[in-house]
Structures are given as structure tokens and as C-alpha cells.
Image (spheres, coloured by chain):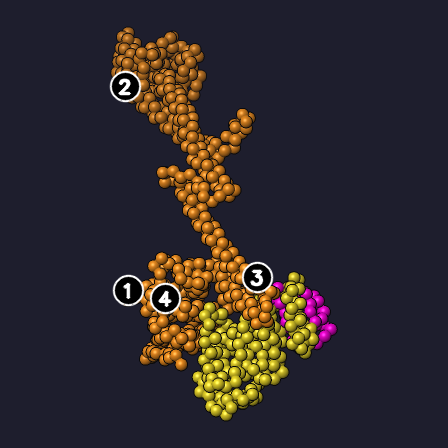
Amino acid sequence: MRLLLVEDELDIQRFLKHALLEAGYQIDAAGDARTAMKFAADTAYDILIVDLGLPDQDGIDLILSLRQVGVKAPVLILSARRSVDERVKGLEQGGDDYLTKPFALAELLARLRNLLKRDSRPEHSNTRLRVLDLELDLIQREVTRSGKPLRLTSQEFALLEFLCRNAGRVVTRSMILERVWGMRIEPKTNVVDVHMSRLRAKVDGGGRKPLIGTMRGMGYVLRNA
Amino acid sequence: MFSEMPRRVAWSAAWRISLWGTLAFSIGTLLVFVFLHRFVADDMQHRNDAWLWGAVSLLGDFAERTPKDALYGQVVGEIAELVREEVPNKKRSLSNADDHVFFLQEGEDRSLKLWVGAGAGEDTLKAIHGSRILPDQPIDLRVDGMGVPFRVVSIRVEDGSRIYLGLSEEDQLRILNNFRFYFVLLWLIIVLFGFALVFSISRSLLKHVQTITDAASRIGRSDLTTRVPTTSRTDEVAHLALTLNNMLDRIENSMHQLHTITDSLAHDIRSPITAVRGRLEASLSARSPEEQTDSIASSIEVLDRLSQFLTDSLDVAEANADALRLARSEVDLEEALASMIDLYQPSMAEKDITLDFHHAGPVTISADVGLIHRMISNLFDNEVTHLPTGCRVMVDLRPEDSARLILQDDGPGFAPEIIQHLFERNTKGRDSSGHGLGLAFVDAVVRAHGGTVIASNPPSGGARIAINLPLSSGVSGYSRGPEVVDQVELSKD
């Protein structure tokens, strides 16, 4: 996967490059819009990360000019602006995504994966999800662990489905809130943790081998090995 | 210094105001005087003419009736003398009656027939012959050797002779001269006095403006506690001073708020940075990998809270400056509340808090869905954080003229010392560990959407927050169905 990173803050550029390389991406990094346009003219990228606050041009204008010269790859917009303005909303509806700084690396990687998936095969064709001895029937909305049925509420089912789809990867609390509840909020109380402990009690209770792990400072992970 | 003073006075607004004001006044009064003068002069002339006509026709009558014998001259002369006694506008003490009036009868051969008056009469006749006399029309006659002209009328007597009666214009001119003299004198006094008065009044007024200006210029440089001087007067300048002081009060207040905000911002940011720094340092010297991970993980948690605080803080600041950008769309408040209740339900159950949701169908508002979600989440966070175990929260949503959302609990209510300032940032209860931003954020979001929020401690106990948000204009009516009360089943399982 070839990725173009357009970010002028060298510190952020460096750590993102490092993290993305580790996640298996091939990275080109540009510090301004001009360099980015040059890179995009030479290479076909699968995905782009564009920071909005570039020194020579507004990030959104850069994306629009990239689109004009025929770059069709999805864009993940990074923004330090707290309120996301209409123009970003417009781009988001066009298939791109945005993330406000500061962000968790896990979330950035999840969004990149999501964008790439959206790009290649938008349908989840599976009707069943399976992680180790945990099995979800997406049509019947039924869960079994080691063949024994678990009684989950619809919220818990949605939460577990999200964890299963991201099995083996860290999911942050804000990712859970956005994907499962459809909200971009930052609660000041431990609402997600309470949900998670209820789910955990049902999935991992009864002396079973724990599947749902807590990554302190990051989020949760559903073990797949 | 000395050369500068007159210059400054000459350029001052007071000088210009009084100069132009006085000029306008003096020109105006002069014009009035000119008309008045003309009116008085004409009136005197008319009265003199009327007297002359009356007198000359009387004399003509006598002259006709008196037999033309040796006594004719004496009789007519005496009557003429009598007439002269009745002269109008006369100041006897000043002038001789002889100089004032003359009676002259001219024979058919244009020779002097009878003369009553000062001097010989020949000069007068000569002057009469020298000027054009119109019948029935008084003329002004100048006689050689006499400084003042005479007003002369004439009448023809039946025997062919002509009678002339002349009245000196001396008295009339003297009166008019006096009139002019006193007017100019008074006019000068009034104009000078008026100028001085206007100058001193406007100078004192403008001096007040100058002191305000001086005070205002000092304020910018030093501090904001100085105020411009005020007076007990109620004029525009006093009003200006009051307005300026009010403005200064507001600026000082804002500056004070700004200082408080920056102070608390510094505190709110420095504390977590210190904590993160300390924990990271601890992780460097950690003895076990677990200890190290623990330090780093808790640093991240602190940073997340800091970032969240910054977001809310900036949103509140933007909203207070009416600069919060809204990405509006149609939002169903009922749905938003329902999913938020789904999210918070387990947390509330942990604390044995019961939540009743009264609602009666979708309530659509045009709003920024992200901000509305964050607002509701803030309200619920408050309930979860501050309510003691076993309490009950009632959420009531109904569309009336506006979307009306009421959140009421049976907890201890808002602390009395903060209830007046609930929606100001940094207001928090004594036992609260938050930043005191939650309700300020709620207020900011509601106001940005054109709504109102009222917090109170109702008499029945607990705390109550009532929010009104304008309904989306696209929603025409709302069918009032049977009200649903969700008694959210909360059990610790």
C-alpha cells in the first residue's frame, strides 16, 4: 500500500512515518502542498493523509486540486481545528474521512483501513463472524462461545461485532463511541468502560479464557490468538 | 508658551463656536434693525405729511375767506402762527419754533405775498421755484443756508395764489439718529456680552470634554481602574462621561474575566503537563516493565483529558464570542436522547440511579449534531458524577413552541453558592473535581443554536435544567400521540 503523507510539522511527520511503516505502508512524506502535488504527479497512491494547516496552501484546496488532476485515492484529513467546518463535511461525504488532533494512533490506522476497505470492497459479505471459539451470527443476531449461546442486548451485540471485526487490533473508546453509538463525543465519565465490563462479564465470565483485553491508555482489544 | 496660548485659543472649538454664533446673531439683529428703522421713519413721515395736509388746507380755507384788505396779511399770518404752535414731534426746549415751520403765500405772479417763518422767505421761494413741485405730493426741500431740509406741501387758493407750508425734518432726523445711536450701542454691548457668554460656556463645556479626553488617554496607558470625571449635570457631555465609564466598566470586567480565564487556563494546562512530565520521568526510572507501562498509560489518560478540556474550552470561548461554527442538519432530539440514554444507562445503573424518559415522538431541530451529542453527554455526565446513589433522573422532551428538554433529579440540587453562576466557566461545586466547564459548554451550545437554558433548584427538591431549542422550520406540525414513559429498567447485573 502506497501512502502519501502531507504534514508540515516535522515531529508529527516523523512519528507518523514510523508508525505507518510499521503498519506495513510504503510512505512518501511531503511538508507542503507543492511537494505533495509533485509526488502525486509521479506516483499513484492508494491513500493520502493531508493535514489542513499547510504552510503554502489550505489542505482542503490541496485536496481539491489533487482531485482535479485525477487523484482518486481516498484522503484522511488531519485537522487541529476543533470544530470541523462545512468544507470538511463536504469532503467527508465524498468518501474521505477526517481526524482531529490529537488522535490515537490506533484510530488513525483504523480509519486508514476503513478508507481502503471502502475503496476496494464496500460490502461485508460475511453473515457470520468467528474469533477463536466466539461466533457471531449477524443475521440471527446470536452469539455463541464454545458452542454455548450468550444472551446479549442489542447494544452489547453491536459492541462485540465491532470488536470482532477489529479482532487483534486496538480499538479506542472514541472509535467505539463513533462506530457503535454513532457519536463523536468525549464523555467525562467511564460510560464505555461500564458497557465493556458488562460485555466482558458475559463473554469471558464463568472461568472462560479472557478474550477482551484492556490496553491501558489506549482502549480495548479482542484477542484472536 | 505665551505665543502658543492665543494660538490654541484661536483654534479651539469654543472660539469657533462663539465666533460663528455671534456673527450669525449680529447679522440677524442688524437685518431686524434695518426693517424696524425703515418702518419707524416711514411712519413718522406719514404722520408729518398728514399734519401738513391738514394744516395747509385749513390755511387755504382761511386765506380764501379772509377779505383781501390791509388786514389780510396780519390775519392769515396770525393763523399761520397758531398752526405753527401745533407742530408734531417737536422738542420745544431744544429748538426755536420759528425754525421749524414756515408759511409762504405766493402771488399769481409768483412773487412773495406773505411769509411767516424764520428769515426773509426769499431764499425759500427761490428754492421752491428751483425744485419741481408736484400737486398733492409733499416734497423734501433744501433751502440755502439751512442745514436741515423741509417737508413742504402746497395748495392753490381760489385767487390764484399758492400757499406753501413747510415743516423742518430736524426733529424726525434727530429721533432717527438717536434711535440708531442707541441701537448700535446696545447692539455692540449685546454682541460683545453674548460672545463672551457663549465663549465661556462652550469653553467650560469643552474643557470638560478635554478632561474626559485626558482621562481616557491615561486609561489606555496605565490601568483600567481610572474613570473619567462625571458631573451632576444631565447634559450630553455628562452623558458622554457616563457612557464612557460604563464602557470602561465593561472592558474592565472583560479584562478581569480574561485574566481569570488565562489564570485558570494556565492552571488547567500546567497541572496535567506537570502530571504527565512526572509520570514520564517515573517511567524512565521504573524498575519493572509493568511500572513503566503504567506510568505511560496514565500519562496518555491525562493527555486525553487535557485535549478534551481544550476542545470544550475553545468551543465555549468561541460560543461566547458568537463565533461557534455550526454544521447544521436536521437532528431528531428524541433519537439523540434515546441513544445517549442507551449509552449512559449502565453507568447510572452502577450507581443505582433510575432514569425516566418522557417523550412523545420525534422532535426535529436544525442543529449541529456533534455539538448536540456533546451537550447531552455533558448533562448526563453531570448527573452520573454528582447524583448520590439511589436517585432518580427525569428526562422530559416535548415539542411546544420550541423543543423543550427538561432534566430533573431528586438529588441534593445545585449548591446555593454557585446557582447564580452555573453557566459561567470555572463554576463548579466545592466537591467537584472537574474544570467547571460542563454547564458553560451546555449554555454555549444552546445559545449558539438560538435557544435558552435555565437551571434551578425547584421547591420540590433536586436540580432542574430546562432547555429550549428552536424547532426546525421544516417541521410543520407535530401529532400529539399518547405520551410514552420509559421506565428504564436498571438493575445491577
Q: Confirm whether circles 1 and 4 share one chain.
A: yes
Please give the range of residues in magenta: A28-53
Q: Which chain is yellow?
A: A
The Cα atoms of the two marked residues, 1 and 4, are separated by 14 Å
Q: Confirm whether circles 2 and 4 share one chain.
A: yes
From the image, tell me which residue sits under label 4.
B465
x then y, percent, for residue A197:
47, 78
Is disc 4 placed on a helix, strand or loop?
Answer: strand
The Cα atoms of the two marked residues, 4 and 3, are separated by 39 Å
From the image, tell me which residue sits under label 2.
B58
The residue that appears at 35% across and 17% down in the rendered structure is: B171
Q: Is residue A83 above or below residue A198?
A: above
Quadrant (top left, top right, bottom left, bottom right) of the N terminus of chain B: top right
From the image, tell me which residue sits under label 1.
B459
Is disc 1 placed on a helix, strand or loop?
Answer: loop
Quadrant (top left, top right, bottom left, bottom right) of the C terminus of chain B: bottom left
Q: Which numbered disc, 2 or 4, marks the residue that appears first in the sequence?
A: 2
Q: Is residue A32 above or below residue A160?
A: above
Q: Label 1 is placed on what type of residue?
A: Pro
Q: Label 3 is placed on what type of residue?
A: Arg
- Magenta segment includes B449: no
The residue that appears at 64% across and 70% down in the rendered structure is: A16
Residue B141 or B243: which is nearer the viewer? B243
